[in-house]
Image (cartoon, rainbow, N blue to C red):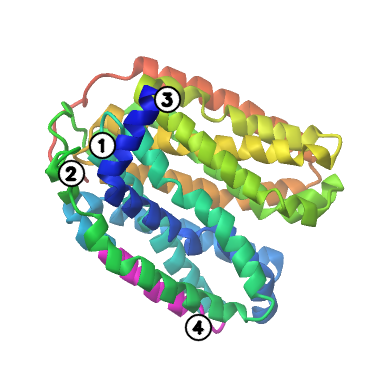
Amino acid sequence: MFHFQSSLLFIRQEWRFLLFGLLLAFWSGPGQTYVISVVVGEIRADFNLTNGEFGTLYTVATLICALLLWKAGPLVDRMPLKSIAMKVSLLMVASMVTFGLVQGPISLFFGIIAVRFLGQGMMAHIAMTATARRYEAVRGRALAIAELGFPLGLALYPPLIAFSLGFMDWRFIWPVMAVIAAITLLPTIPFLARTSVKAVDPRAATGEALVSDTRHWTRREVLRDTGFYMLLPSVMLPATVITGFFFHQVYLIEVQGWNFATWALTFPVFAIAHLVGSFSLGVLVDLLGARRLAPFLLLPSAMGILLFAFAPSQAYAVLVMILLGFGSGAAGPALSALWPEIYGTRYLGAIRSVAAVAAVFGSALSPVLVGVALDSGYAIKSIALVFAVGVLCTAILAKGALILHKSGPPTSSGGGK
């Protein structure tokens, strides 16, 4: 009861900044796979692309986004928050307009790079980095609230776009979203990113570290830390499994003998479970710390994939979505809180960009890897078992990294590069 009341007080004090993170997360949606995949059929038909050709184009574009994010991620540490948020949001609005004007595979390729780098990449990165840096004692709950933008987008974008395709060409959908983003996001950034001196150190709004942080690793130091590489699979695997599963969901549902229209009705269940998982882990992060929780974050998703593979009927679809949604939601705030817990906040943008690159890299490769496995004749059950073994290995690595991790940087060097 105490935590509920303190959470309500926190939200009342900090609702502006929390809404700022939520809106950035929500408007990253037009660059996310779950949005673009809704119009894949129309895009392929317009440009005469096969599944393999579009998949290759999409994967290469996403990998380029990862490289761009590596370079651009540290800007969150160097630029005032309002400035970088406004500039990236303006570019995202322009990219959405441009995406509706693509005329062939080449312009489509650059259009995908633009919306994915700015949306899935920078807008999500800014939202999570700024929130994690701004709060300490309530970092888990703050991240959980900001991350609500992701399940909200998952719940709204696909059905609304699918409905719009009934009377509108896919090319017009992105400019329409751009106009809505320009109205709901751009004017609100200066107001919502305002600092509240009641709950946080004012310097957090300008990208500076909180005084309570005792050690601040640079990105160069983190890249020399063995424990960091032992933790990276925990970042890559959630993106890999969720993207791979939903990218191939039409085929997977068909192979299982399930009805896709019925399956589509369970997406709101995924979004609700995501919300519950995010808030539950947000509270647990504040109570126990992200370090203790990190090794166990992928267990719900592993259970969901195994249940999907071995379920005797579609009656289990709701439970599958509950497990996948809860696992996806749980991983977000815990992993976002893990980096400042271990490495400090001063160079958090640079450090978190490395983790974000790993996640983008995993989401880029998963459609190809799962597709190759399916084309090679591997059964869904076999793929699910491989994933379960991967989760077990990831948990062991994470636990080992957190046991062996040193309390501070291996050396002292300047710069957050």
Name the residue that disc number 2 marks. Answer: 204
Q: Secondary structure at mark 3?
A: helix
Which residue reaches farthest top? 403
Estimate the spatial distance between the alpha carbons at disc 2 and disc 1, rounded to whole Å. Answer: 8 Å
User: What's the residue type where badge 3 is placed?
Assistant: Leu
Estimate the spatial distance between the alpha carbons at disc 4 and disc 2, rounded to whole Å. Answer: 39 Å
Segment tinted magenta in the rendering: 86-104
Where residue 387 sits: x, y (%)?
A: 65, 33
Q: Secondary structure at mark 2?
A: helix
- Labels 2 & 1 near each other (Cβ < 8 A): yes
Estimate the spatial distance between the alpha carbons at disc 2 and disc 3, rounded to whole Å. Answer: 23 Å
User: What's the residue type where badge 1 is placed?
Assistant: Tyr
Name the residue that disc number 1 marks. Answer: 135
User: What's the residue type where badge 4 is placed?
Assistant: Leu
Q: Nearer the viewer, residue 6 or 304?
A: 6
Q: Is residue 103 magenta?
A: yes
- Please tell me how crowded label 2 is: few (under 14), some (14-19), or many (20+) other residues with Cα within 10 Å: many
